[in-house]
Image (spheres, coloured by chain):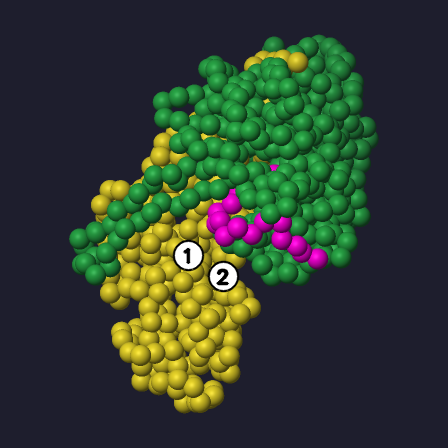
Chain colours: A green, B yellow
Amino acid sequence: MKKKIVVTALATALSVSMVGVVSAAQMKQTIATQQTSLSVNDSLASIRTVTLNGITYLSIRDLGNAVGIYFEVNDRGGVSAYFQEHAVELSALSKEIAVDGEKRELQHAVENVNNMYYITLNDFISAFNAESAVDGSGQVAISTVQKVQDPSRVIWLNPSSLLASVIEEEGRFDYIVDARTGQYSELLRTTDASDLVVAPNGQKAAYSVESGAVYVIDLASKQSRAVTYDGTIKPELVWSADSSTIYFLQGDKGSVIAKLNLTDGTISKVLEDKVDYKANLSVSADGSQFYYTVIKPGAVTADASKPVDQDDVAIDLTGTEPQVYRFDASVKDAKPEKLTTTTDDKVFVGAAADGSKAYYVSAEDNKLASLVAVAKDKSITKLIDDKDVLQAIMAGNKIYVLADGGSSEIVYEIDAATGQKRELTSVPNSVSELIAGAGTPIAIVSDGQVSVDNNGQWKKVTQ
Amino acid sequence: MKSKFFKNIAFTAIALTVAFSSISIANVAEAASKLSGKIVINGSSALLPLTLQAANEFKKLNPKVKISASAAGSVTGPQAVRKGIADIGACDWDASLDVPGFKKFEGQVANKVAVIPFAAVTNSNVKVANLSTKQLQDIFSGKVKNWKEVGGSDAEIVVVNRAFGSGTRVNFQMKALDGADFMTKGDNYKEVKSSGDMKTAIETTPNAIGYMDLVYVTSKMTALKINDVAPTEANVINGKYKVWSYGYYMTKGQPTGATKAFIEYVQSKAFQNGSLKKLKFIPISAMK
């Protein structure tokens, strides 16, 4: 049985263990301790520090008390520290530590001052798998909160929490992540569910499984219920604005737009026009206007009667660029309307809640990628055309844009109704993705890690 | 609200006890976000929905990469790559190797992107649920002409075959017929050019038998057991059902640039376990 002793009870033992190695009394006479205020797991903590040869060391006991490390004296004359299911063995005046039995080396030896162990900040972070950051005002922050690691997908659930999905050998794990602290809890583990599509009210999410069945999970109770066992392929699920209905594209080629009644599970077709490869379905708030893209595969001419090595094959890619369509379900016998015909590549962003227009990123050779709005009357408005648009996301009635600003990247917020643009912030070029939701702060992905805008500071919430 | 956090101080984060070697989608995206270029993909009609879905997702983080796709049967994929008119040849077999009917395409690299199960299918009026390899060989060679010879009703069998060059045909011949030859003509024999045409033919032709990707099987037809093993994803993964293949993206040499990034996206855990499964393909990682 392990003898767990908090650090305060170790002083005597430590001083005894160090006899013959260093004179603790001597250190006591010559080294002055200071109190330093650090943010530890989002709370201010007073930590004793000493400076030796110009290097600042922090009291392991104080840090341990702040984050919840348990200590015991081990039979090798050092201290064993137990934290988050890991054991770290430390010895005074030694750079060598053992983490879960594996030897590692610190940058600086652990110091013993006045019968207390001290360690540098970087070495503490390294030994205890912590993180540190310094904000613009110079405040040092240490975090030992375990965070979701290497998520494959992160989206906002509501203004205070995110959904982070991690794919392991055993399947996918979906976690609800506290956007302020990074603390997380498991929502769903699955081997065959599609990505969760969160309802606009932030209270539930939908997913389909390999059989085609659709489930809705309550984000508070974490309970799922089947809504339909219909076996057709559903490439995209889209919630209605009031979170009462799910629209979806149906079939492997996304040919049909269908509507799923969540109350009784009935499915009705909204549009079946034999046009394949619809994608990016977006529905107006009143459920009457449907925007989507259609992509036409290239036309191939190949003569199978000729020898294979003659490579008698030709591809005509004319007209294969995605085009934006609108379908007005409120008009009897209406036909879908092709809103765009241009040859630029179009990356669909979304449609305005009032169904008046849709937005896409337009990309052409040797030109900046621009953000464009196309209205019901097919008129085109360029919302950003002076910066290279790297990504655009529709979030409620806002569009968030990550654009190339040269030495950094710029985040814009655009009012979808007015087209008014404002620059929110700039981020380093290492930022690869923006994550935004309706009414949420923005989050960014950099080096594979997600950070949330916390009142002007980027707070890392995944590892 | 200009944040200076990243500019002033970098995070210090050292994961001491965690070894994680996989590449996340975020990492792939990071490397690719300012990529530009054009990718032309041609070949397998079975892989076309997957390719277009992947292209749509990939471009959201790589808007300057233009991706065009087309399909006219697997063999046209590596042919188009060899001819230099496509960057990726989508093919239902490893075209860098010899297979029945096709010599290997020299210098091409096969990049696995999916697992594709195939099923022998009949019109729903056929009262046979299971066939052995020998029975399939006899039916598709024209030796057995009536369903009553294999336990069904007294009705002439209509054999529907895919045209030469189809990856589904190559795989069905190799794995369901154990390499035996197809019949090539006859009153009750027809050839179709695509998976969609096969689906229509089987659904609408009484007493018809054909074969297709499992994903295309509908409630208006019967997917047969082969040697008493049902064509299910579970039976493919557990090794009991043999009629499946990897789907490949063939490239001229190792892929580079935008083509490489796109293939990595399709192979990423996020896509494999997300949209690829949604389209009823099996992730390549499922096969041990």
Q: Do badges 2 and 1 share one subunit?
A: yes
- Residue A48 visible (yes or no): no
Category of crowding for the residue at label 2, using alpha-carbon neighbours closer than 10 angstroms: few (below 14), some (14–19), many (at least 20)? some
Q: Nearer the viewer, residue A351 or B234?
A: A351
Query: Which residue is located at x 57 percent, y 16 percent?
Result: A426
SS label for mark 1:
loop
**Residue A271 located within the stretch drawn in magenta:** yes
Query: Which residue is located at x 28 percent, y 64 percent?
Result: B164
* Chain of the residue displaying label 1: B
Which residue is tagged 1?
B46
- Badge 1 amino acid: Ala
Give the vertical position of B25 relative to B163 (above or below): above
Q: Nearer the viewer, residue B211 or A118?
A: B211
Give the mark nearest the N terminus, 2 or 1: 1
Q: Please identify the residue farthest to the front as the structure is shown.
A: A332
SS label for mark 2:
helix
Picture quadrant of residue A317 = top left
Picture quadrant of residue A93 = top right
Q: Position of residue B51 (x, y in %)?
A: 43, 47
Q: Is residue A228 left or right of residue B47?
A: right
- Give the magenta range: A266-282
- Badge 2 amino acid: Val
Q: Are marks 2 and 1 in contact (CB under 8 Å)?
A: yes
Query: Which residue is located at x 33 percent, y 75 percent?
Result: B189
Q: Is residue B106 left or right of residue B24?
A: left
Which residue is tagged 2?
B215
**Residue B25 located within the stretch drawn in magenta:** no
Give the vertical position of A452 relative to A456 (above or below): below
Q: Position of residue B119 (x, y in %)?
A: 45, 69
